[in-house]
Image: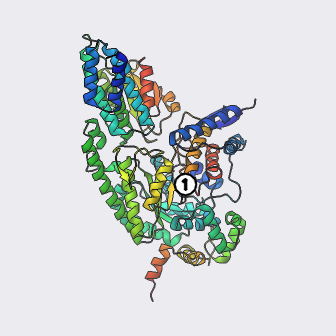
Amino acid sequence: MSKIWTRMGDGSAVEMTPDELRADIIAASEDAADKGRVPPLEDNEVEKLIEIFSAPWRVIGVEPGHEVPLTKDETACTLVSSQLSSGAHLPISREAAVEIFERVFCFDTMELGWIDYSFKPAKAMVSLDQVSIERLLATTVFPVLYGAMPNMGLYYTPDGPFTNPADLLGMMKIDEARQEEMKAAELCMEDMIYMCKRFDEIGADGIDFDTTASAGDADFWATLKTVEELKKTTDLGIEVGMSGEFILGMHGEIEYNGKKLAGMFPHQQLKVVEEAGADIFGPVVNTKTNKSAAWNVARAVTFVKEVCKQATIPIHANVGMGVGGTPMFETPPVDALSRASVAMVEIAKVDGL
Amino acid sequence: MGDPFGMSLTHAIASGMGGIRTAGDLVARMQLNYRMRLPEAKKYVAEKLHVSTFDLSDSTVMRNLREELDIGCVEAIPGLAKGLAAKARIADLLDIKIAAVEKLKGKLPV
Amino acid sequence: MAHEDLIKEAQESVLSQDKAKAIDVANRALAAGMSPQEIMNEGFIVGIRQLGDKFDEGEVFLPELMLSAEAMEAAMEICNAALPEGESQSRGTVVIGTVEGDVHDIGKAIVVSYMRASGFEVHDLGRDCPTDKFVDTAKEVNANVVGASALLTATLRKQREIVEALKEAGIRDQVKFVVGGAVCTQGWADEIGADAYAKDAGDGIRKIEALLGL
């Protein structure tokens, strides 16, 4: 039986028989269905995935006419930063990097952000980022967003003023831990609202909240409340991109509009993001490095398909390193990446990536 | 994140609309600022441009059309609208508000 | 009361994060003639494993895990006191930290909670921890396991540094070295000679138990 050359979730090459490929795809879909309580992939979708992964070509693409717009997180760090962002450290300005994305990579949108890509450290630099965005708004044609991570963990000691709840939990101080989380969430929210309004002032097209909920349910809550406020008081388009497929319950009891945030899977995260008023939602499904690329893509597509089915707003699935079925490797193989890309568009029916 | 060739460029080639090379930026605006899902966003833009939704991603069709409509091209052609001028024309063509264009209007002498 | 009922109660006391109940059950089990090992292994430890499954499924969260750990520790104290001198049932001593240059610690906090809840003695070195500290603490507490977490590709190489430092200190063969973190992979663990790669807290516990023959 001839083998199919493919990849693992860590990017390493592997050969699989057609039966192994099929079994992996079905098992992955069932895993997602079981975990997230969503429908598994249908037979024709499984066949489509098999076709995608059996294709002998290095790079594959969507069918003509099925193309989708792209948004991007991590700003232009990919060109100007170091290994910190798997970047190429080109000796160019951030503005030039964004323009390269417009006219060389032909992205549909792009964002500018601070190199230390979180709201807290970027706050001190807001006026610099404002004029950079103004310059880009004047010179580019495509939508320009401002991007940053809520990264609420920076509000805890030693980086911030509030006691680290992980330390308090370790001392069994559950109530104190929860109180510190809420205080951090309030301050994080204040900072994010302050900064986003500065970009509304100068006419930015939108804001991208990247890796939302990285510090758990309180981080998610702070972002949702920020989005709520911004949609009432600004003209900004808002994209909320997640950090994981599952909201970590550091607090465990925070609710948004009566819904407990801890433990939410992507299709549940979508609902509260919609309620907050966001314009684009970017679900994340984490790659398992010891499983095949096909397994990872099948699993990711199963989750995201349900998100797309339930969504009333555009869905731009996260397909960066280690998410959305892409391998967890700094220089991901283009064969695996293009397959994840196509699967998201053709099977999950995303509105963008 | 990371590795411009392996990540950004691969997605752009495999699945991306093509930005200002085609009509990707226009469709993206309808998603970001008007919350349109993809089919609705493509339909809206296609109708405004008097092309099919299929043509929106066709660089042959869109290159000529963008020059004709003067809404910004990927090549740097002297005399054609760029930056804010292109955005102003896009806002008018699509009958939408673009924040930077509104800010500019506010700055122009009466 | 039948031993089976006590075992079930022990499991439930941990699942419901009820410290008082765990203490009560431990005392009643010993009074009923059960061995400390039996009530621990079949009662409390099984309960913690079930709680771990619920944590993985998103039915319980970190605060509940901590409260269960507290219940578990209280029960273990009673059971260990009932064992003959020198036979106390710590399941192993673990030294764990986030590597130098890396300040991410939420994942590590979950692992620490889970390990404590599972009956391990855990020395948490915190975040941004210098390589020397891993080695010095491992020697000081006679660790069975050293765990290193890294969330950034830029700091991943510190895990290799720790392996080399353990060899230089002459204790590499005495400890099991486990690596984890979002950017860590099995391939990387194999490359640097780690004993195991933990993809999440539950996986880490299972692998540590297997490595220690528990």
The residue at the point 38 percent across, 19 percent down is C42
> From what the image shows, is residue C34 above or below residue B69?
above
Question: Can residue A149 be seen by looking at this rendering?
Answer: yes
> From what the image shows, is residue A5 above or below residue C212?
below
Residue B8 in the image: state x and y as whole percent.
57, 53
Question: Can residue A17 be seen by looking at this rendering?
Answer: no
Residue A111 in the image: state x and y as whole percent.
49, 61
The residue at the point 52 percent across, 56 percent down is A72
> From the image, which quarter does the N terminus of chain C lie in?
top left
> From the image, which quarter does the C terminus of chain C lie in?
top left
* Residue bearing mark 1: A310
Figure colour scheme? rainbow
**Between residues A139 and C86, which one lies in front from this camera angle?**
C86
Write down the chain letter for disc 1: A
**Between residues A148 and B67, which one lies in front from this camera angle?**
A148
Residue A53 in the image: state x and y as whole percent.
68, 41
Q: Secondary structure at mark 1?
A: helix
> From what the image shows, is residue A10 above or below residue B91?
above
Answer left or right for B9 relative to A285.
Answer: right
Residue A274 in the image: state x and y as whole percent.
47, 59
The residue sitting at the front extreme is C1
The residue at the point 25 percent across, 50 percent down is A161
Answer left or right for A285 relative to B39.
Answer: left
**Crowding near pointer 1: few (<14 within 10 Å), some, many (20+)?**
few
The total of numbered circles placed on residues is: 1
